[in-house]
Image (cartoon, grey):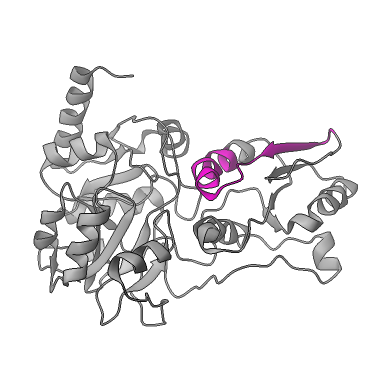
Amino acid sequence: MLSTGKMFSNVQEAAEVLRGGGLVAFPTETVYGLGADAENPAAVARIFAVKGRPADHPLIVHVATPDQIVHWAREIPPMAWHLARRYWPGPLTLILRRASCVPDIVTGGQDTVGLRVPDHPLALALLKVFGGGIAAPSANRFGRVSPTTAAHVREELGDAMDLILDGGPCRVGIESTILDLSGHQPRLLRPGAITLAEIEAVLKQPIAQPGNEAPRVPGMLRSHYAPKTPVCLIPPAYLEAEVRWHLGQGQRVAVLSRIALLLPDACLWKGMPDYPAGWARELYARLRALDVQCFDYILIEAPPIGADWRAVRDRLERAASAHHVSSLRSSRGISAPFGEVGDHSVN
Protein backbone atom coordinates (compact mmCIF):
# COMPACT_ATOMS: atom_id res chain seq x y z
CA MET A 1 0.00 0.00 0.00
CA LEU A 2 1.17 3.54 -0.73
CA SER A 3 1.94 5.83 2.19
CA THR A 4 -0.33 8.85 2.62
CA GLY A 5 2.45 11.14 1.45
CA LYS A 6 3.18 9.07 -1.68
CA MET A 7 -0.52 8.83 -2.53
CA PHE A 8 -0.93 12.61 -2.22
CA SER A 9 2.12 13.12 -4.44
CA ASN A 10 0.65 10.81 -7.09
CA VAL A 11 -2.71 12.59 -6.94
CA GLN A 12 -1.03 15.97 -7.33
CA GLU A 13 0.87 14.69 -10.36
CA ALA A 14 -2.33 13.25 -11.86
CA ALA A 15 -4.16 16.56 -11.39
CA GLU A 16 -1.36 18.38 -13.20
CA VAL A 17 -1.55 15.87 -16.05
CA LEU A 18 -5.29 16.56 -16.38
CA ARG A 19 -4.77 20.33 -16.32
CA GLY A 20 -2.24 19.92 -19.12
CA GLY A 21 -4.71 18.07 -21.34
CA GLY A 22 -3.41 14.60 -20.53
CA LEU A 23 -5.09 11.28 -19.79
CA VAL A 24 -5.18 9.64 -16.36
CA ALA A 25 -6.47 6.16 -15.58
CA PHE A 26 -7.90 6.09 -12.08
CA PRO A 27 -9.81 3.65 -9.85
CA THR A 28 -13.45 3.93 -8.88
CA GLU A 29 -15.55 1.51 -6.88
CA THR A 30 -17.02 0.17 -10.14
CA VAL A 31 -14.23 -0.10 -12.73
CA TYR A 32 -11.10 1.87 -13.68
CA GLY A 33 -11.83 5.02 -15.65
CA LEU A 34 -9.92 6.67 -18.49
CA GLY A 35 -10.12 10.32 -17.50
CA ALA A 36 -9.62 13.74 -19.07
CA ASP A 37 -10.60 17.30 -18.17
CA ALA A 38 -14.30 17.33 -19.03
CA GLU A 39 -14.14 20.99 -20.15
CA ASN A 40 -11.22 20.45 -22.52
CA PRO A 41 -12.59 19.10 -25.86
CA ALA A 42 -9.12 18.30 -27.21
CA ALA A 43 -8.26 16.25 -24.14
CA VAL A 44 -11.60 14.42 -24.26
CA ALA A 45 -10.99 13.66 -27.94
CA ARG A 46 -7.90 11.70 -26.89
CA ILE A 47 -10.15 9.36 -24.89
CA PHE A 48 -12.08 8.48 -28.04
CA ALA A 49 -8.85 7.93 -30.00
CA VAL A 50 -7.29 5.68 -27.34
CA LYS A 51 -10.41 3.56 -26.87
CA GLY A 52 -11.40 3.42 -30.54
CA ARG A 53 -14.75 4.79 -29.39
CA PRO A 54 -17.32 6.19 -31.86
CA ALA A 55 -17.61 9.97 -31.55
CA ASP A 56 -21.36 10.00 -30.88
CA HIS A 57 -21.04 7.89 -27.71
CA PRO A 58 -21.41 10.02 -24.57
CA LEU A 59 -19.18 9.98 -21.51
CA ILE A 60 -19.93 10.23 -17.79
CA VAL A 61 -18.59 13.27 -15.93
CA HIS A 62 -17.22 12.44 -12.47
CA VAL A 63 -17.38 15.19 -9.84
CA ALA A 64 -16.19 15.49 -6.25
CA THR A 65 -19.41 16.52 -4.48
CA PRO A 66 -23.16 16.57 -5.18
CA ASP A 67 -23.34 20.37 -5.08
CA GLN A 68 -21.26 20.49 -8.28
CA ILE A 69 -24.33 19.32 -10.21
CA VAL A 70 -25.29 22.97 -10.70
CA HIS A 71 -22.18 23.62 -12.78
CA TRP A 72 -22.88 20.76 -15.17
CA ALA A 73 -26.68 20.56 -15.40
CA ARG A 74 -29.77 22.76 -15.67
CA GLU A 75 -33.43 22.25 -14.81
CA ILE A 76 -32.38 19.91 -12.01
CA PRO A 77 -35.43 18.11 -10.56
CA PRO A 78 -35.79 17.68 -6.78
CA MET A 79 -35.46 13.91 -7.12
CA ALA A 80 -31.89 14.38 -8.44
CA TRP A 81 -30.88 16.05 -5.18
CA HIS A 82 -32.71 13.39 -3.20
CA LEU A 83 -30.86 10.56 -4.97
CA ALA A 84 -27.51 12.37 -4.82
CA ARG A 85 -27.83 12.80 -1.05
CA ARG A 86 -28.76 9.13 -0.68
CA TYR A 87 -26.31 7.44 -3.06
CA TRP A 88 -23.32 9.75 -3.68
CA PRO A 89 -20.53 8.88 -3.42
CA GLY A 90 -21.65 5.65 -5.04
CA PRO A 91 -22.34 3.64 -8.20
CA LEU A 92 -25.24 5.73 -9.51
CA THR A 93 -25.09 7.92 -12.63
CA LEU A 94 -27.81 10.55 -13.13
CA ILE A 95 -28.73 11.74 -16.62
CA LEU A 96 -29.72 15.42 -16.54
CA ARG A 97 -30.16 18.31 -18.96
CA ARG A 98 -26.69 19.63 -19.72
CA ALA A 99 -25.42 23.09 -18.83
CA SER A 100 -23.89 25.33 -21.48
CA CYS A 101 -20.32 24.63 -20.28
CA VAL A 102 -20.49 20.93 -21.23
CA PRO A 103 -18.72 20.29 -24.55
CA ASP A 104 -20.61 18.45 -27.29
CA ILE A 105 -17.91 15.77 -27.42
CA VAL A 106 -18.71 14.76 -23.83
CA THR A 107 -22.43 14.32 -24.49
CA GLY A 108 -22.23 12.81 -27.96
CA GLY A 109 -24.08 15.89 -29.23
CA GLN A 110 -27.07 15.30 -26.96
CA ASP A 111 -28.78 17.78 -24.65
CA THR A 112 -28.11 15.55 -21.64
CA VAL A 113 -25.08 14.76 -19.49
CA GLY A 114 -24.31 11.86 -17.16
CA LEU A 115 -22.97 12.78 -13.70
CA ARG A 116 -21.78 10.83 -10.67
CA VAL A 117 -19.58 11.04 -7.56
CA PRO A 118 -17.40 7.89 -7.38
CA ASP A 119 -16.97 6.06 -4.08
CA HIS A 120 -13.21 5.49 -4.04
CA PRO A 121 -10.78 7.46 -1.87
CA LEU A 122 -8.21 7.87 -4.66
CA ALA A 123 -10.80 9.04 -7.18
CA LEU A 124 -12.28 11.51 -4.69
CA ALA A 125 -8.83 12.82 -3.77
CA LEU A 126 -8.03 13.35 -7.46
CA LEU A 127 -11.31 15.15 -8.11
CA LYS A 128 -10.84 17.46 -5.12
CA VAL A 129 -7.25 18.35 -6.02
CA PHE A 130 -8.08 18.77 -9.72
CA GLY A 131 -11.07 20.94 -8.88
CA GLY A 132 -13.10 20.21 -12.00
CA GLY A 133 -15.05 17.41 -13.63
CA ILE A 134 -13.34 14.38 -15.12
CA ALA A 135 -14.95 12.80 -18.18
CA ALA A 136 -14.22 9.09 -18.00
CA PRO A 137 -15.44 5.90 -19.64
CA SER A 138 -13.91 2.57 -18.66
CA ALA A 139 -10.17 2.33 -19.36
CA ASN A 140 -10.27 -0.36 -22.06
CA ARG A 141 -10.75 -0.75 -25.80
CA PHE A 142 -14.28 -0.02 -26.93
CA GLY A 143 -16.67 -2.93 -26.43
CA ARG A 144 -14.20 -5.07 -24.49
CA VAL A 145 -14.13 -6.22 -20.87
CA SER A 146 -13.85 -3.35 -18.40
CA PRO A 147 -10.73 -3.21 -16.18
CA THR A 148 -10.99 -3.73 -12.44
CA THR A 149 -7.27 -3.42 -11.61
CA ALA A 150 -4.47 -1.09 -12.70
CA ALA A 151 -2.73 -4.10 -14.24
CA HIS A 152 -5.71 -4.61 -16.57
CA VAL A 153 -5.33 -1.02 -17.78
CA ARG A 154 -1.60 -1.42 -18.41
CA GLU A 155 -2.10 -4.72 -20.23
CA GLU A 156 -4.74 -3.35 -22.59
CA LEU A 157 -3.80 0.30 -23.14
CA GLY A 158 -0.08 0.21 -22.44
CA ASP A 159 1.62 3.57 -22.87
CA ALA A 160 -1.49 5.34 -24.17
CA MET A 161 -1.99 6.73 -20.64
CA ASP A 162 0.00 9.66 -19.36
CA LEU A 163 -0.42 8.30 -15.83
CA ILE A 164 -2.15 5.40 -14.06
CA LEU A 165 -3.26 5.70 -10.44
CA ASP A 166 -3.27 2.26 -8.78
CA GLY A 167 -5.99 1.99 -6.15
CA GLY A 168 -6.17 -1.79 -5.98
CA PRO A 169 -9.05 -3.99 -7.20
CA CYS A 170 -12.43 -2.35 -7.67
CA ARG A 171 -14.89 -3.14 -4.89
CA VAL A 172 -18.10 -3.32 -6.99
CA GLY A 173 -16.65 -4.60 -10.26
CA ILE A 174 -19.33 -3.63 -12.79
CA GLU A 175 -20.37 -0.25 -14.13
CA SER A 176 -22.74 2.15 -12.37
CA THR A 177 -26.51 2.12 -12.51
CA ILE A 178 -27.70 4.81 -14.93
CA LEU A 179 -30.97 6.64 -14.21
CA ASP A 180 -32.42 9.16 -16.65
CA LEU A 181 -33.97 12.21 -14.96
CA SER A 182 -34.04 14.42 -18.06
CA GLY A 183 -37.70 13.76 -18.92
CA HIS A 184 -41.09 13.69 -17.28
CA GLN A 185 -40.56 10.28 -15.63
CA PRO A 186 -37.37 8.66 -14.28
CA ARG A 187 -36.11 5.79 -16.45
CA LEU A 188 -33.60 3.06 -15.73
CA LEU A 189 -31.17 2.97 -18.66
CA ARG A 190 -28.50 0.62 -17.30
CA PRO A 191 -28.76 -1.76 -14.32
CA GLY A 192 -26.00 -1.79 -11.75
CA ALA A 193 -25.23 -2.42 -8.09
CA ILE A 194 -27.97 0.00 -7.01
CA THR A 195 -31.12 -1.85 -8.01
CA LEU A 196 -34.39 -0.68 -9.51
CA ALA A 197 -36.22 -1.65 -6.32
CA GLU A 198 -33.88 0.44 -4.18
CA ILE A 199 -34.38 3.51 -6.35
CA GLU A 200 -38.14 3.09 -6.40
CA ALA A 201 -38.16 2.79 -2.61
CA VAL A 202 -36.20 6.04 -2.26
CA LEU A 203 -38.29 7.99 -4.78
CA LYS A 204 -41.56 6.31 -3.75
CA GLN A 205 -42.65 6.00 -7.37
CA PRO A 206 -42.24 3.48 -10.20
CA ILE A 207 -39.29 3.77 -12.58
CA ALA A 208 -39.99 3.43 -16.30
CA GLN A 209 -38.03 1.27 -18.74
CA PRO A 210 -36.14 3.01 -21.55
CA GLY A 211 -37.99 3.69 -24.78
CA ASN A 212 -36.65 4.38 -28.24
CA GLU A 213 -36.40 8.08 -27.42
CA ALA A 214 -34.18 7.54 -24.36
CA PRO A 215 -30.80 9.30 -24.29
CA ARG A 216 -27.78 7.35 -25.47
CA VAL A 217 -25.72 6.20 -22.50
CA PRO A 218 -22.59 4.08 -21.96
CA GLY A 219 -22.55 0.30 -22.16
CA MET A 220 -25.86 -0.43 -23.84
CA LEU A 221 -24.95 -1.98 -27.17
CA ARG A 222 -26.40 -5.46 -27.63
CA SER A 223 -22.82 -6.71 -27.86
CA HIS A 224 -20.53 -5.32 -25.19
CA TYR A 225 -18.21 -6.19 -22.25
CA ALA A 226 -16.89 -9.00 -24.42
CA PRO A 227 -13.60 -10.91 -24.30
CA LYS A 228 -12.06 -12.06 -27.58
CA THR A 229 -12.88 -15.67 -26.66
CA PRO A 230 -16.52 -16.52 -27.48
CA VAL A 231 -18.79 -16.61 -24.43
CA CYS A 232 -21.80 -18.94 -24.12
CA LEU A 233 -24.46 -18.55 -21.42
CA ILE A 234 -25.86 -21.96 -20.48
CA PRO A 235 -28.88 -22.76 -18.28
CA PRO A 236 -27.68 -24.80 -15.26
CA ALA A 237 -29.60 -27.93 -16.29
CA TYR A 238 -27.71 -28.09 -19.61
CA LEU A 239 -24.27 -26.95 -18.48
CA GLU A 240 -22.52 -30.30 -18.02
CA ALA A 241 -23.94 -31.71 -21.27
CA GLU A 242 -22.88 -28.56 -23.11
CA VAL A 243 -19.35 -28.82 -21.78
CA ARG A 244 -19.05 -32.46 -22.85
CA TRP A 245 -20.46 -31.63 -26.29
CA HIS A 246 -17.80 -28.98 -26.90
CA LEU A 247 -15.08 -31.29 -25.64
CA GLY A 248 -16.40 -33.92 -28.03
CA GLN A 249 -15.81 -31.46 -30.86
CA GLY A 250 -12.13 -31.28 -29.85
CA GLN A 251 -12.48 -27.82 -28.34
CA ARG A 252 -10.76 -26.38 -25.27
CA VAL A 253 -13.29 -24.88 -22.91
CA ALA A 254 -13.33 -23.03 -19.60
CA VAL A 255 -16.35 -22.95 -17.30
CA LEU A 256 -17.57 -20.34 -14.81
CA SER A 257 -20.41 -21.55 -12.62
CA ARG A 258 -21.91 -21.52 -9.16
CA ILE A 259 -22.43 -25.26 -9.26
CA ALA A 260 -19.49 -27.64 -8.98
CA LEU A 261 -19.08 -29.99 -11.95
CA LEU A 262 -17.26 -33.30 -12.32
CA LEU A 263 -15.56 -32.67 -15.65
CA PRO A 264 -12.67 -34.11 -17.64
CA ASP A 265 -9.20 -32.65 -17.11
CA ALA A 266 -9.42 -31.05 -20.56
CA CYS A 267 -11.90 -28.55 -19.12
CA LEU A 268 -10.93 -25.74 -16.73
CA TRP A 269 -13.61 -25.03 -14.12
CA LYS A 270 -13.68 -21.92 -11.95
CA GLY A 271 -16.24 -21.63 -9.18
CA MET A 272 -18.22 -18.40 -8.84
CA PRO A 273 -19.93 -16.96 -5.75
CA ASP A 274 -23.54 -17.80 -4.99
CA TYR A 275 -24.64 -14.17 -4.66
CA PRO A 276 -24.81 -11.35 -7.26
CA ALA A 277 -22.40 -8.89 -5.62
CA GLY A 278 -19.72 -11.60 -5.58
CA TRP A 279 -20.30 -12.38 -9.25
CA ALA A 280 -20.08 -8.70 -10.14
CA ARG A 281 -16.84 -8.21 -8.22
CA GLU A 282 -15.09 -11.21 -9.82
CA LEU A 283 -16.61 -11.43 -13.30
CA TYR A 284 -14.41 -9.11 -15.36
CA ALA A 285 -11.16 -10.27 -13.77
CA ARG A 286 -12.13 -13.91 -14.43
CA LEU A 287 -13.01 -13.17 -18.07
CA ARG A 288 -9.73 -11.35 -18.64
CA ALA A 289 -7.69 -14.17 -17.05
CA LEU A 290 -9.40 -16.81 -19.21
CA ASP A 291 -9.20 -14.72 -22.38
CA VAL A 292 -5.40 -15.04 -22.56
CA GLN A 293 -5.34 -18.83 -22.12
CA CYS A 294 -6.30 -19.76 -25.69
CA PHE A 295 -9.62 -21.46 -24.94
CA ASP A 296 -12.05 -21.98 -27.79
CA TYR A 297 -15.04 -21.07 -25.62
CA ILE A 298 -15.87 -19.74 -22.19
CA LEU A 299 -19.05 -21.43 -20.96
CA ILE A 300 -20.88 -19.60 -18.18
CA GLU A 301 -23.75 -20.83 -16.07
CA ALA A 302 -26.65 -18.45 -16.65
CA PRO A 303 -27.44 -16.77 -13.32
CA PRO A 304 -30.97 -16.72 -11.92
CA ILE A 305 -33.63 -14.48 -13.41
CA GLY A 306 -34.48 -11.93 -10.76
CA ALA A 307 -34.08 -8.31 -9.74
CA ASP A 308 -30.93 -8.94 -7.67
CA TRP A 309 -29.16 -10.61 -10.60
CA ARG A 310 -30.30 -8.19 -13.29
CA ALA A 311 -27.06 -6.23 -13.61
CA VAL A 312 -24.89 -9.36 -13.77
CA ARG A 313 -27.17 -10.95 -16.37
CA ASP A 314 -27.10 -7.74 -18.39
CA ARG A 315 -23.29 -7.82 -18.63
CA LEU A 316 -23.19 -11.55 -19.38
CA GLU A 317 -25.84 -11.40 -22.09
CA ARG A 318 -24.06 -8.57 -23.86
CA ALA A 319 -20.72 -10.39 -23.62
CA ALA A 320 -22.32 -13.53 -25.08
CA SER A 321 -23.90 -11.55 -27.94
CA ALA A 322 -20.49 -10.70 -29.43
CA HIS A 323 -20.21 -14.12 -31.12
CA HIS A 324 -22.62 -16.42 -32.91
CA VAL A 325 -21.87 -19.77 -31.31
CA SER A 326 -22.96 -23.21 -32.43
CA SER A 327 -23.67 -25.58 -29.58
CA LEU A 328 -25.48 -28.68 -28.41
CA ARG A 329 -28.36 -26.46 -27.28
CA SER A 330 -28.75 -24.78 -30.65
CA SER A 331 -28.68 -28.14 -32.43
CA ARG A 332 -31.63 -29.17 -30.21
CA GLY A 333 -33.45 -25.89 -30.55
CA ILE A 334 -32.68 -24.89 -26.93
CA SER A 335 -31.64 -21.38 -26.01
CA ALA A 336 -30.58 -19.74 -22.77
CA PRO A 337 -33.33 -17.79 -20.99
CA PHE A 338 -32.02 -14.32 -21.77
CA GLY A 339 -33.60 -11.30 -20.13
CA GLU A 340 -34.39 -8.02 -21.82
CA VAL A 341 -31.39 -6.70 -23.76
CA GLY A 342 -32.17 -3.61 -25.77
CA ASP A 343 -30.07 -1.98 -28.46
CA HIS A 344 -31.59 1.49 -28.26
CA SER A 345 -28.43 3.03 -26.83
CA VAL A 346 -24.69 2.64 -26.80
CA ASN A 347 -21.40 2.55 -24.85
Q: Is residue 123 above or below residue 65?
A: above
Q: How many marks?
A: 0
Question: Foreground residue, 106 or 115?
Answer: 115
Q: Is residue 324 left or right of residue 225?
A: right
Left or right: 258, with 267 as reference point: left
**Which residue appears at 45% of the width and 65% of the height?**
220
Residue 124, given in percent of the width and then of the height, sits at 21, 39
User: Is residue 118 within the magenta segment?
Assistant: no
Question: Was residue 266 drawn as part of the magenta stretch in this picture?
Answer: yes
104 versus 11 height, above or below: below
At 40% from the left and 32% from the top, the residue drawn is 150
User: What residue range appears in magenta?
Assistant: 265-288
Query: Where does residue 3 sit, x and y in percent of width and height?
Result: 25, 17
Residue under the image location 72 percent in, 44 percent down: 255
Can you see residue 272? yes
Q: Position of residue 327 (x, y in %)?
A: 80, 60
Quadrant of the image containing the N terminus:
top left
User: In which quadrant of the rendered image does the C terminus lie?
Assistant: bottom left
Q: Nearer the viewer, residue 39 or 217?
A: 217
In this picture, residue 170 sits left or right of residue 203: right
**Displayed quadrant of residue 272:** top right
Specify whether residue 56 is in view.
no
Query: x%, y% of residue 172?
Result: 42, 44
Q: Is residue 276 left or right of residue 109?
A: right
Identify whether 337 is placed above or below 36: below
Q: Quadrant of residue 287?
A: top right
